[in-house]
Amino acid sequence: MILSHILSKMMINLLSLLHFGSNKIYYMIKSLILLLLLNLIFSYTNPVQGQYDSPDPGVIFYNNSYYAVTTGGRDGHFFPIWKSDTATNFSQVGWIFMSPPAWTQCCDYWAP
């Protein structure tokens, strides 16, 4: 939130420097800066995925926790297992497959 505040102050200062009177360029730049600022303030990162892609989730509730298994993989592992107590903020706790199963074809790991 501090970064958003600093960036908004910078954009306000930039607007004051870019004042071209009633010129269309001024309004276009002002609109662009406003859109960038709104995007920064209201951007959202999915807490389930975080920095990794996690398509095709399957979720169960067990022992007061939510568990999700998603397709995909990285680092030679496949189908990550995620755990959460809130159903919104998941942490990875393991993998279904530590290496590709013999019955799979290269690079074709998805939910059937």
Image (cartoon, rainbow, N blue to C red):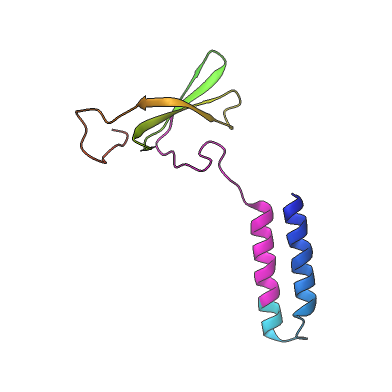
Residue drawn at the location 19% of the way across and 29% of the way down: 103
Quarter of the figure with residue 87: top right
Q: What stretch is highlighted in magenta?
A: 29-58
Task: Determine whether, in the image, residue 105 is placed left or right of residue 52.
Answer: left
Q: Quadrant of the C terminus?
A: top left
- From the top left corner, tell me how far across and down residue 16 is, in percent: 80, 76
- Magenta stretch encompasses residue 42: yes
Task: Determine whether, in the image, residue 103 is placed left or right of residue 39.
Answer: left
Residue drawn at the location 54% of the way across and 12% of the way down: 63
- From the top left corner, tell me how far across and down residue 65 is, in percent: 55, 19
Quarter of the figure with residue 23: bottom right
- From the top left corner, tell me how far across and down residue 104 is, in percent: 22, 32
Tally of numbered discs: 0
Residue drawn at the location 74% of the way across and 67% of the way down: 11
- Magenta stretch encompasses residue 39: yes
Residue drawn at the location 41% of the way across and 39% of the way down: 55
Relative height, residue 24 to residue 72 (above, below): below
- From the top left corner, tell me how far across and down residue 52 is, in percent: 47, 41
| Residue at the far front in the pictured view | 75
| Residue at the far top in the pictured view | 63
Relative height, residue 18 to residue 109 (above, below): below
Relative height, residue 83 to residue 8 (above, below): above
